[in-house]
Amino acid sequence: MAVVLSYCKPSPPLRRFHRRCGNLWKKENVRSSRRSSSVTAMFWKSNKPAEVKEFDISLRDYTLTESNIEEALENKPKQKVISLSVVSSIFEIPQAEWDACALDSSQPESYNPFLSYGFLSSLEDTGCAVRETGWMPLHIVAKDECESILGVVPLYLKSHSYGEFVFDHSWADAYRSFGGRYYPKLQCCVPFTPVTGPRILIRDNPCKEQVFDAIVSAMTELASKLQVSSLHITFPSGAEWDKLKEKGFSQRIGMQYHWKNRDYKNFDEFLMDMKQSKRKNIRQERKKIGTQNLKMRRLQGDDIKARHWDSFYDFYRNTTDNKFSLYL
């Protein structure tokens, strides 16, 4: 059983590389507007990976202890039972309930639109993240005794590693070399979106920390029942990263590159952060655009027709088709 957790943590500005590999970093290099960010991941191994065909996805209930000052004085903490279940589609969850969990979980961080019901449901509705494409939804839902939803988790049973932006293909090769099966695996993430944000989405309530613990236990319980090789939580929030480390999850660190706007007043000010040769090349490229008789139009809402989406899709596919990219 495995769990993967990832998030991006900003680091100091990325300096230029020296031409000789033996001396990569130079203190005298001027600053760059590009910044590196570390990407972290967590893993929980299982010794007996197996292919999942028919499986039991039922989860046990958990008892929480909720207490206030009066109950503490009486030494009678209130017991609260929550039930956890797995649904095969986000459409089995009310939109308002999902979005409430996502919004509460984003604080104090800014709200993440990729965690919204609208975005995740569109991936299922269009056939992008469904069983047929190797993304079988197995979202976890936590409810109290009144059937009110306390938390949700975007979770998928994966038959490949595409669309994750955490490249674990070498792990799959290692599993195969030792006679094991790396796929299927459980993936807690936002499909095709390497953007950091909370992954275990919980409503604000007095037992929020206990609900978090119960959901994590349910995820590992599900991984054991499915006998999958691993459970991955990718690009989580920093708070989740720390909590899961305390629970014994292994961590993996990768790298991303983020562009940061340093309050540039205009494009020329942005160019001044570059070497002279880079500034010259960019200015020459921009001049060429003016000679090609191109026109820029901004389309919104119903102004965007089917032909526009078809062209956008073709341009998007060309990014990988022309470069023969194998991994996304």
Image: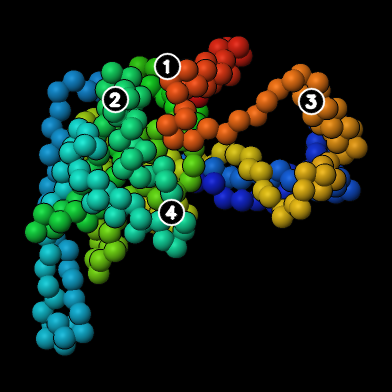
First in sequence: mark 3 vs mark 4: 4
Q: Residue at x 25, y 50 (%)?
A: 96
Q: Position of residue 193 (x, y in %)?
A: 46, 35
Q: Position of residue 221 (x, y in %)?
A: 21, 42
In space, the residues marked 1 and 3 are separated at their CA atoms by 55 Å
- Disc 3 marks which amino acid? Gly
- Disc 1 marks which amino acid? Ser
User: Which of the two marks, 3 or 4, is nearer to us in this view?
Assistant: 3
Q: Nearer the viewer, residue 226 or 122?
A: 122
Query: Horizontally, is 308 left or right of 144 in the view?
Result: right
Pointer 4: residues within 10 angstroms few (<14), some, or many (20+)?
some
- Disc 4 marks which amino acid? Tyr
Is the residue 67 above or below the residue 51 in the image? below
Tag 3 secondary structure: helix
Q: Nearer the viewer, residue 79 or 154?
A: 154
Instruction: In the displayed orientation, state which residue is furthest to the left.
Output: 145
User: Which of the two marks, 4 or 2, is nearer to us in this view?
Assistant: 4
The disc placed on residue 177 is 1
In space, the residues marked 4 and 2 are separated at their CA atoms by 25 Å
User: Which of the two marks, 1 or 3, is nearer to us in this view?
Assistant: 3
User: Which of the two marks, 1 or 2, is nearer to us in this view?
Assistant: 2
Pointer 1: residues within 10 angstroms few (<14), some, or many (20+)?
few
Identify the residue position indicated by label 3 in the image. Answer: 290
Q: Position of residue 253 (x, y in %)?
A: 54, 42
Confirm or deny contact between disc 4 and disc 1 (CB under 8 A).
no
Q: Position of residue 107 (x, y in %)?
A: 41, 61
The disc placed on residue 130 is 2
